[in-house]
Amino acid sequence: MMIDHAARDAGIAINTYTTVLRRPQVPHDVFATYWRDVHGPLCSRVPGLGWYVQYHLDREQDAHLWPARDGIAAFPDYVLDGGVEIGFASAADQQEFDAASSILFADEQNMFAATVAYALPHGSRTLVDRIADPSPNGPDGLDRMHVHFSPGNTDPDAFVGFMTRFAAMLADDPALLRVRLHLPDAYDNADPAPPAPNVAHQVPPERERIAVLDLSFATPLTRRRFFASDRFTATVAEQQRHIGHATAFAVSGMYTYVRDGELTLAGLRGSRPAQLIERLGAVNQTRADVRHLLLTGEI
């Protein structure tokens, strides 16, 4: 039986889920490298952070990523290049981060055309996590996706209740290796977030209130079989009753920079240097004296 590691995320009391769209003039490989190895380590060092993960999304994805259903429309004109989780152990930690974050948000204009930070003042919920690695840094061979939903013209409170039940059903099935549910507060265009200059932060009405399911399967074949199962198809009528829009995004890589308030190797050195250190087994680069030198500039 696979071990469930969901409890390790319980320390993230407050978080945000941010959608990101790259500047069209910036080539994707340049964007991805800058986000991972320049912006990532910068964000990691802003005080107060307890959790920081980049999810890079693939625009070229499986046509069967999420089953289309009559009455549930795709979000119109919805293209993303990534999602970000930033989390905190307490409100005080979030305030410390917010007070120092201008140095971070000033960097967004170099690569992002649009970012939208959805607030989760009561945190998100990991219902199951059967993946052993607590801090992935890159593609891991798993079939990962983020699925965005909105109630459309349905009852928003009933939508929240359904998404909670739906996530629990998914987590109970062994086909799902990871299920994490984000149910953020409704986004307010009058109070744009994050406060990054020269970056768009507006959303259309259908994206003001969303839910996000972070799902992982072992393989696309496992995923397709699950979507064809009686257990999943039994939820279709309720999906159609409570969901107005749904769009799925394939995750090409998950990059963890801060976990439990501590810098990961990717947070300390950058994602690609961390991959090189791991690939070569450069254990000296992980020692406390090297970490101290890099953080303080002193031996």
Image: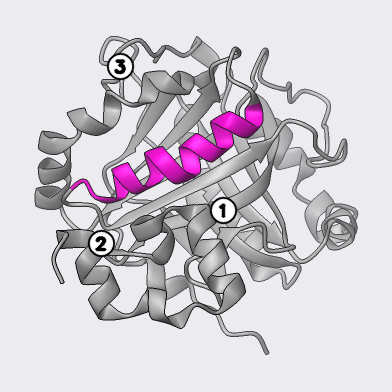
Q: CA distance from mark 1 to mark 2?
A: 24 Å
The answer to whether residue 5 is left or right of residue 241 is left
Q: Which residue carries the number 3 mark?
A: 192
Nearest the viewer among 175 and 229 is 175
Give how far across and how far down residue 199 sits, in percent: 39, 14
Q: Is residue 166 visible?
A: no
| Precedes in sequence: disc 3 or disc 1 | 3
| Precedes in sequence: disc 1 or disc 2 | 1
Asked if residue 282 is positioned above or below residue 123 in the image, the reply reads below
Asked if residue 78 is positioned above or below residue 102 in the image, the reply reads above
Q: Which residue carries the number 2 mark?
A: 294
Secondary structure beneath label 3: loop
Task: Indicate the amino acid at tag 1.
Answer: Met
Nearest the viewer among 153 and 126 is 126
Secondary structure beneath label 2: helix
Question: From which residue to which does the magenta span run?
Answer: 28-46
Quarter location, residue 226: bottom right
Give how far across and how far down residue 81 sits, in percent: 60, 30
Q: Which residue carries the number 1 mark?
A: 254
Asked if residue 124 is positioned above or below residue 23 in the image, the reply reads below
**Which residue is situated farthest in the bottom direction here?**
1
What kind of secondary structure does the magenta stretch mostly adopt? helix
Instruction: Give the position of the C terminus as an image quadrant.
Output: bottom left
The answer to whether residue 224 is left or right of residue 80 is right
Task: Indicate the amino acid at tag 3.
Answer: Pro
Closer to the eye: label 3 or 1: 1
Task: Indicate the amino acid at tag 2.
Answer: Leu
Give how far across and how far down residue 206 sits, in percent: 54, 16
| Precedes in sequence: disc 2 or disc 3 | 3
Looking at the rendered structure, which numbered label has been put on residue 169? Answer: none
Q: Residue at x 45, y 57 (%)?
A: 256
